[in-house]
Image (tube, rainbow, N blue to C red):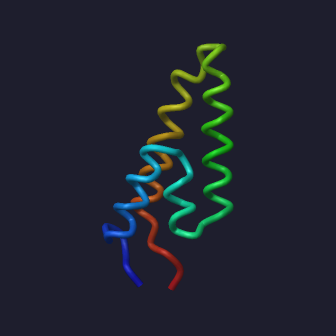
């Protein structure tokens, strides 16, 4: 199985760059994809309260890094 830094992980990280959770979905990690998408949606909704300006970039970067570092099950 391909490890960290493989082409699939790079593609997943690029997908997560555009839509949080999409990279996890590409990797077949449905629950992680749903959670990242939901958390990103919540933080976007919190933009109204100015909290989202801090929270969304953190969740966005976390999703990208998580997709890029995924090693898969052995």
29 and 65: which is toward the camera: 29
Quadrant of the rendered structure where residue 1 is? bottom left
In this figure, what is the number of numbered marks? 0
Above or below 2: residue 35: above
Counting from the top left corner in percent of width and height, residue 19 is at 51, 45
Above or below 34: residue 30: below
Above or below 64: residue 30: below
Q: Residue at x 53, y 54 (%)?
A: 22
Give the side of residue 37 with respect to residue 69, left or right.
right
Quadrant of the rendered structure where residue 5 is? bottom left
Q: Residue at x 48, y 46 (%)?
A: 62
Q: Residue at x 51, y 64 (%)?
A: 26
The residue most toward the top is 49
Counting from the top left corner in percent of width and height, residue 33 is at 61, 56
Q: Residue at x 63, y 46 (%)?
A: 37
Counting from the top left corner in percent of width and height, residue 40 is at 60, 38
Counting from the top left corner in percent of width and height, residue 42 is at 68, 33
Give the side of residue 62 with respect to residue 32, left or right.
left
């Amino acid at each position: 199985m391909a490890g960290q830094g493989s082409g699939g992980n790079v593609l997943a990280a690029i997908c997560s760059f555009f839509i949080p959770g999409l990279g996890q979905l590409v990797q077949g990690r449905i629950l992680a994809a749903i959670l990242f998408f939901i958390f990103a949606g919540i933080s976007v909704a919190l933009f109204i309260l100015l909290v989202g300006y801090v929270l969304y970039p953190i969740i966005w970067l976390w999703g990208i890094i998580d997709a890029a570092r995924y090693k898969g099950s052995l």
